[in-house]
Amino acid sequence: MLDLLVLAPHPDDGELGCGGTLARAKAEGLSTGILDLTRGEMGTKGTPEERAREVEEASRVLGLDYRGNLGLPDGGLADVAQQRLVVAEALRRLRPRILLAPLEADRHPDHTAAARLAVAAVHLAALPKAPLEGRPHRVERLFFYPGNHPFTPSFLVKISAFIDQWERAVLAYRSQFSGEAASETVGPKGVEARKAMRRYFGNYLGVDYAEPFISPLPILHVPWARA
């Protein structure tokens, strides 16, 4: 069982979206992992082989307990029955307590599809009669990390002590974040913008850096309670 699992449409999305939170969780003794849905073979920059090597380096930087890839088609992610079953079987196998997935509001169709697949797969993985291998598993909570569209966070995670580790993990993807930019997010400025976003949200907490997340359900928290 993993404490924290990130669903990433492409290699680098998990690190870029919530790598600081993964680093903090690992430092606090939790088990962490990233499940890439595709190999990023349609990316303008880099090759699948280059990105596979970059995945290994980024995973080492974050100290992940698990890194996997479902090999679904890059540019072809879709909320369809076959892909739902593939993701749901992975959830039964990995048995994450908390699942982090991309926010549905995004300019990239794969990110939108990954969000919908996450919701469907969480539901299917828990159903005893679902046509899946493995024992049913119920994910405790599903949260979303933002991408390229405006959003309002539900909560923030302080990552000030882990911002350098986050940046090293992201920059492990040299094929994507060095040299000439391919888009507003692929290239050196994309990393700068994501770091600035973390600084912006950290300001609200009076800390240096924080990562934002969106919760589809209210979060029950009483400040003076022990649990």
Image: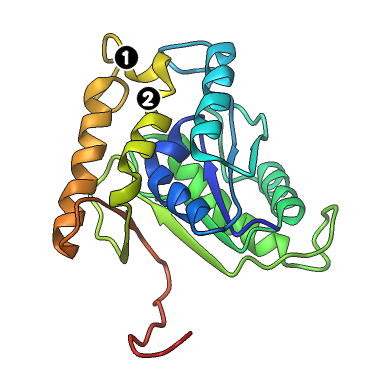
Q: Residues within 10 Å of mark 1 (few under 14, many from 20)?
A: some
Left or right: 212 as drawn, with respect to 220: left
Image quarter (top left, top right, bottom left or bottom right) of the N terminus: bottom right
For the point 44% across and 38% down, the residue is 15
Residue matched to label 2: 171
In the rendered view, how is the structure colored? rainbow
- Among the 4 quarters of the image, the one containing residue 53: top right
| Disc 1: which residue | 178
When the figure is inspected, residue 110 is found, relative to residue 105, above or below; the finding is above
Is residue 208 visible in the rendered image? The answer is yes
Kindly state the secondary structure of the residue where label 1 is placed. Answer: loop
Residue drawn at x 72%, y 66% is 126
Position of residue 174 measured from the top left corner of the image (x, y, whole percent):
40, 16
Give how far across and how far down residue 208 sits, in percent: 19, 51
Instruction: Give 224 or 213, whichever is nearer the viewer.
Output: 224
Instruction: Determine which of the numbered discs, if any, sits on residue 48 in the image.
Output: none
The foreground one among 174 and 138 is 174
Q: Is residue 170 above or below residue 213?
A: above
Q: Are marks 2 and 1 in contact (CB under 8 Å)?
A: yes
Please name the residue shown 29% across and 9% down the image: 179
Q: Amino acid at mark 2?
A: Leu
Asked if residue 96 lies left or right of residue 190, the reply is right
Badge 1 amino acid: Ser
- Which is nearer the N-term, disc 2 or disc 1? 2
42 or 61, nearer to the observer: 61
Q: Position of residue 198 (x, y in %)?
A: 24, 47
Provide the secondary structure element on which disc 2 rests. helix
Identity of the residue drawn at 41% across and 12% down? 45
Q: Real-space Cα distance between discs 2 and 1?
A: 8 Å
Task: Please tell me how many numbered marks the rendered image carries.
Answer: 2
